[in-house]
Amino acid sequence: NRAGIARMAAALAEAKAALQAQDFLRLFQANIDFRDSWVSAVRNRRLASAISRYADQILNVRHATLRAADIQPVVVAGLEELYHCFARHDPVGAHDSMVRFVLAAERAFDALDVGHAE
């Protein structure tokens, strides 16, 4: 719906501004707002609920990876790509974009070697 797309656009604009200002906390919040916008657009409530159940784990990954300055522009570019798919009502593109986004986040998180025992 248009309201959801507008919320995503606002969150994307905020993410870009935060990246420009090198403001990690602002980028972190914009990223959360972006995700909340698209999750609220998921018509299948059971699917939306399943996605939300993993929010804490995703929050940990997001928090760790977004601190890396070299990852921040990659994240914002991923948000922009995903936004354009939603705005075009392109579910296949959104799927493909999300898969790339998640895999990139996984690689970035693994590269940080966070939480691995010595």
Image (cartoon, rainbow, N blue to C red):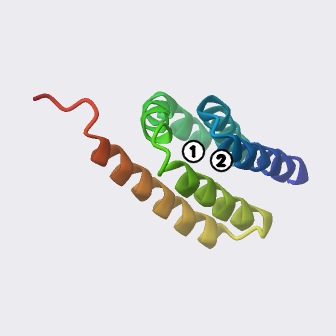
Element marked by disc 1: helix
Q: Which mark is residue 72?
A: none
| Nearest to the observer: residue 74 or residue 33 | 74
- Amino acid identity at mark 1: Leu
In the figure, is residue 81 to the left or right of 1? Answer: left
Element marked by disc 2: loop
Q: What residue is drawn where x is 35% and y is 44%?
A: 109
Q: Is residue 40 visible?
A: no
The mark tally for this picture is: 2
Q: Residue furthest right?
A: 2
- Amino acid identity at mark 2: Asn
The residue carrying pointer 1 sits among few (fewer than 14), some (14 to 19) or many (20 or more) residues within 10 Å by Cα, namely few
Q: Quadrant of residue 39?
A: top right
Q: Which mark is residue 44?
A: 2
Residue beneath disc 1? 47
Q: Quadrant of residue 46?
A: top right
Q: Position of residue 72 (x, y in %)?
A: 54, 48
Mark 2–mark 1 Cα distance, whole angstroms, equals 5 Å
Q: Quadrant of the C terminus?
A: top left
Q: Position of residue 94 (x, y in %)?
A: 62, 64
Q: What residue is drawn where x is 81% and y is 51%?
A: 9
Q: Are marks 2 and 1 in contact (CB under 8 Å)?
A: yes
Q: Quadrant of residue 21?
A: top right
Q: Position of residue 5 (x, y in %)?
A: 82, 53
